[in-house]
Amino acid sequence: MPKVLMIAFHYPPFEGGSGVHRTLKFSRYLPENGWQPIVLTANPRAYPKTGVQQLAEIPQNVVVRRAFACDTARHLSVGGRYLRSMALPDQWVSWWCGAVISGLSLIKRYKPSVIWSTYPIATAHLIGLTLKRLTGLPWIADFRDSMTEDHYPRDVWTRRTYLWIERRAVKHAARFVFTASSTRQMYLTRYPALKSENCILIPNGFDDDDFDGINSEPSASCHARPVRLLHAGLIYTDDRDPRAFFRAIARLKKEGRVNARELIVDLRASGSEAYYGKLLAELNIDDIVRLLPPLPYREALNDCADADALIILQAGSCDHQIPAKAYEYLRLRKPILALTTSAGDTSALLVQVGGATIIDLADEDEIYRRLPSFIDAVRAKRHELPDPAMVKRFSRKHQTLELSNCLHQMAPES
């Protein structure tokens, strides 16, 4: 079986973000498509949080090498301070040296046909670039989302370093993978030398096996209890700024149109509990909007299945991205309150699959006007649900088949 060297920072036992699922599921299902994955990842000491729940999902025949890596901010700082160069392109740049040495050892021993590296940890692409230059193996750069934009990253030195890596990836990689069509188009426009046939679209998705035993049927009547809306995961204070949503709820509560007996909004693992807690108290809606602690992945899916409707928060600055949770929401076939612009890729996905009410996250007045009717539709079980036939297209097994086709293009003799 031909082999692929997969370079990914996020891999079990990493816990605390959705990015881990992409590489984990690829490594699980690639053997079914004729490829043996060899995973080059980081020592768990570099992870801010670890857990054992997903370790069992790593197939026994998958080789996993955990190279030396530190977190500059936690391990190499003195009094919380460190040289800026010690965290470029990111605070896990120490992984580069250990991973290159380990990668060369793996290549010598297992003789992979292709190198694949995945963002959003930029050091992963730096490792992929180095190993490609040292060995000459074809390299696939899995960008997922954009590394750089007009005003991102905001730090000037990080942005310059990202651009340096990005330009060299465009020069040396054989294929480029994106998760959203507008990101793909942005790179084709930014780099005219790129060929469209070399820029592959492989969205994120869901794994049906993760939903075994989870009851995703519409919940029982909620006339005798509050309608429960749930947002699962981090809520960034800029790209997912929920203040307009909070203010709209506060206005509705002040007018007596919503209350905690009829509506509960749960924010699970927002990541900024102190900030949002203060804001909710000031708006006097902390009885309606609750901040809940994180849960392990399977329990978090059960929590989503238990909700009456699910919330997406995404500002216009992320129009070319689709949050990974959107695919899990669709798989659960729940009504979705998508607070995002109508011009972005997330909106396009939800319009295509169905099941969502879409309102601009920044438009407080529109949220104020339309939120009551959304709640009423959810309570009466008359809100549209996602089309199950369309949802199936985003299974992880289907996405892995797309990746295996890309790998075969890189190594046709395999």
Image (spheres, helix red, strand yellow):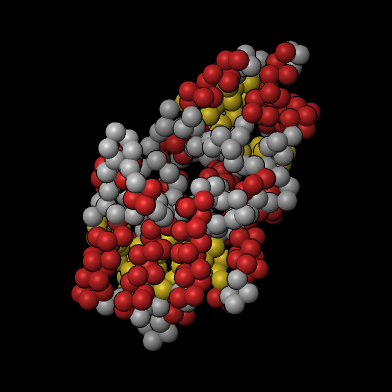
Q: Please report the residue visible at 29 percent of the width from the left and 33 percent of the height from the top.
A: 79
Examine the rendering and report whether any part of residue 134 can be seen.
Answer: yes
Out of 208 and 26, give the one closest to the viewer. 26
Report the residue at 67% width, 45% height from top.
316
> Residue 284's spot in the image, x, y percent?
62, 13
Q: Is residue 384 visible?
A: no
Observer-nearest of 329 and 100: 100
Quarter of the image with the C terminus in it:
bottom left
Query: Is 28 left, or right, of 382 in this rendering?
Result: left
Name above or below for residue 112 compared with residue 25: below
Residue furthest toward the bottom? 413
- Relative placement, left or right, of 93 versus 152 is left
Residue 1, x across and y down, in percent:
31, 77
Q: Work out which residue is located at the far front of the displayed protein and give it.
A: 83
- In the rendered image of this protein, does residue 367 appear above or below residue 65? above
- Camera-side residue: 83 or 409? 83
Residue 40 spot, x, y in % from top left: 30, 62
Q: Position of residue 400 (x, y in %)?
A: 45, 65
The tally of labels here is 0
Query: Residue sitting at 60 percent across and 29 percent down?
Result: 229
Q: Is residue 62 above or below residue 289?
A: below
Query: Quadrant of the rendered structure where residue 130 is?
Result: bottom left
Q: Residue at x 71, y 45 (%)?
A: 341
